[in-house]
Image: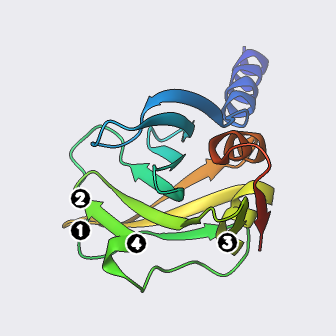
């Protein structure tokens, strides 16, 4: 029986590691624009999406899992890809928009079939991305997303022939 339990636990861990980015098509913003959206759900229930808007800007959106937690809207989440330095948003307020359920950040804009963004390049070539979220009245929480399949999904979102440079 203990070997059955160990086998079950092993399968559960293996299943958790097969998260993969997918591409959905549909509405991407409140303005009704449609297009490809790269999506992945964390084992925790949080969701990460990347999409391109009508002005060719690439956006990253993180949404909290269902429940009572609320994001502190005074700070943008911090993200860290693999063991690189954490990326902390400290610029233009319009480049990171927060609400109680999540945040949306501008990653860059496609111009002349090119996107210069070290962050997007790392999202496409890394292994994992960790978000650190400050929650209202609850301190901090971390969320880990796999980057398995992110390159193919982001290429589909950006469109054919877009070169990403870091």
Distance Cα–Cα, label 3 vs label 1: 25 Å
Pick whichever, 47 or 115, lies toward us: 115
Give the mark nearest the N terminus, 3 or 2: 2
Tags 1 and 4 in contact by the CB under 8 Å rule?
no
Tags 2 and 1 in contact by the CB under 8 Å rule?
yes
The answer, for residue 145, to whether it is visible in the render is: yes
Pick whichever, 64 or 56, lies toward us: 56
Q: In this view, does 70 lie to the left or right of 158?
A: left
In the image, what residue occupies the spot 61% across and 31% down? 23
Element at label 2 = strand
Q: Which mark is residue 73?
A: 1
Q: Where is residue 112 in the image (x, y as percent from the top left)?
A: 70, 63
Element at label 1 = loop
Distance Cα–Cα, label 2 vs label 4: 14 Å
Element at label 4 = helix
Crowd band around label 3 with a 10 angstrom C-alpha radius: few (<14), some (14–19), many (20+): some
Element at label 3 = loop
């Amino acid at each position: 029986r203990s070997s059955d339990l160990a086998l079950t636990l092993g399968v559960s861990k293996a299943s958790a590691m097969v998260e993969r980015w997918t591409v959905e098509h549909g509405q991407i913003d409140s303005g009704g624009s449609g297009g490809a959206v790269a999506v992945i759900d964390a084992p925790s229930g949080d969701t990460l999406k990347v999409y391109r808007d009508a002005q060719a800007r690439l956006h990253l959106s993180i949404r909290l899992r269902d429940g009572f937690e609320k994001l502190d809207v005074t700070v943008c989440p911090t993200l860290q890809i693999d063991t690189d330095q954490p990326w902390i948003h400290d610029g233009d307020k319009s480049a990171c928009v927060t609400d109680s359920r999540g945040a949306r950040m501008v990653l860059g804009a496609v111009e002349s079939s090119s996107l210069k963004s070290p962050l997007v390049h790392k999202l496409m070539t890394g292994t994992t991305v960790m978000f650190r979220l400050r929650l209202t009245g609850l301190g901090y929480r971390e969320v880990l997303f796999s980057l398995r399949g992110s390159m193919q999904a982001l290429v589909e979102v950006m469109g054919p022939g877009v070169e990403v440079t870091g």
